[in-house]
Amino acid sequence: MKLQALALSLLAATGLATPVRRDVGQAVYTLRLSSRVATLDGVYLTTSANGSTLGVYPTPAAERLHVYPVKNPTTGLAELRTQGAGNTLAVVGKHGLLDFASLEDPAAVPVPEGGKCDWTSFRLDDEEQGGVLRYAGEGAQNGGGWAAFPDVTAEGGWSVKWKGGCLLTELRGGNIAKAFTTEEYMPVQVVYERVKDE
């Protein structure tokens, strides 16, 4: 019985992580930041030198991230797949502070106790100023939002993270604030834009 359960769970994990081929007519989007800080506003997201963390990095060769949404049958929300690389975007971490990452196989990521790796719960909302990407997974109903943190591994770089609602209530007027995370951060929005001629 245990062997059957193990085989079934391995098969299910493989099925969840299998890349979904993009329909040629399907929309492809880039992701950029919207912020009150001029150096972050309008800057497109790329991956860090390690190839998985999403943010704003001063590498001249960094290419804009291109993603397309795939509806997850379980959550009814969107998974975001990268065009070309075959990766999936996910939030990974614990204690209400989750890294925004591009992962080859999120189902295979080892998650520590109390942590999460969620790639099935994104929402693409249309708003007056354009499309806004939101994380809508477990715990997001209590509020929260995207924040940019200075990346100590890339001078001048900012990594993007999802902060749970209780962590963001301390922000006032878009100023850099300090929370119990002991780092300075800036609230941002992640905006999606349709790529032309894809």
Image (cartoon, rainbow, N blue to C red):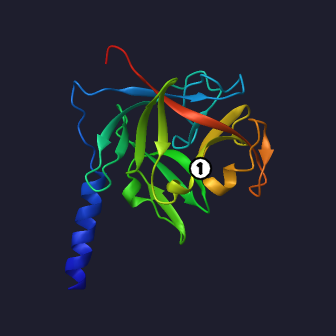
Q: Does 178 sit left or right of 48 as displayed?
A: right
Q: What percent of the width, then of the height, locates residue 1? A: 20, 86
- Residue at x-position 53% and y-position 65%: 115
Quadrant including the C terminus: top left
Give the farthest residue toward the bottom: 1
Left/right placement of residue 124 relative to residue 154 reads left
Q: Is residue 192 visible?
A: yes
Count numbered badges in the picture: 1
Front one among 134 and 141: 141
Answer left or right for 2 relative to 34: left
Counting other residues with Cα less than 10 Å from the Cα at mark 1, is it few (<14), some (14-19), or many (20 or more)?
many
Q: Which residue is mark 1?
A: 144
Picture residue at 23% right of the left edge, 37% below the top = 21
Q: Residue 78 in the image: x percent, y percent?
A: 35, 44
Query: Which of the 4 image quadrants contains residue 23?
Result: top left
**Left or right: where does residue 190 sit relative to residue 1?**
right
In the image, residue 156 above or below residue 73 = above
Badge 1 marks a residue whose secondary structure is: strand
Q: Is residue 149 above or below residue 11?
A: above
Quarter location, residue 153: top right
Name the kind of residue labelled 1 in the image. Answer: Gly
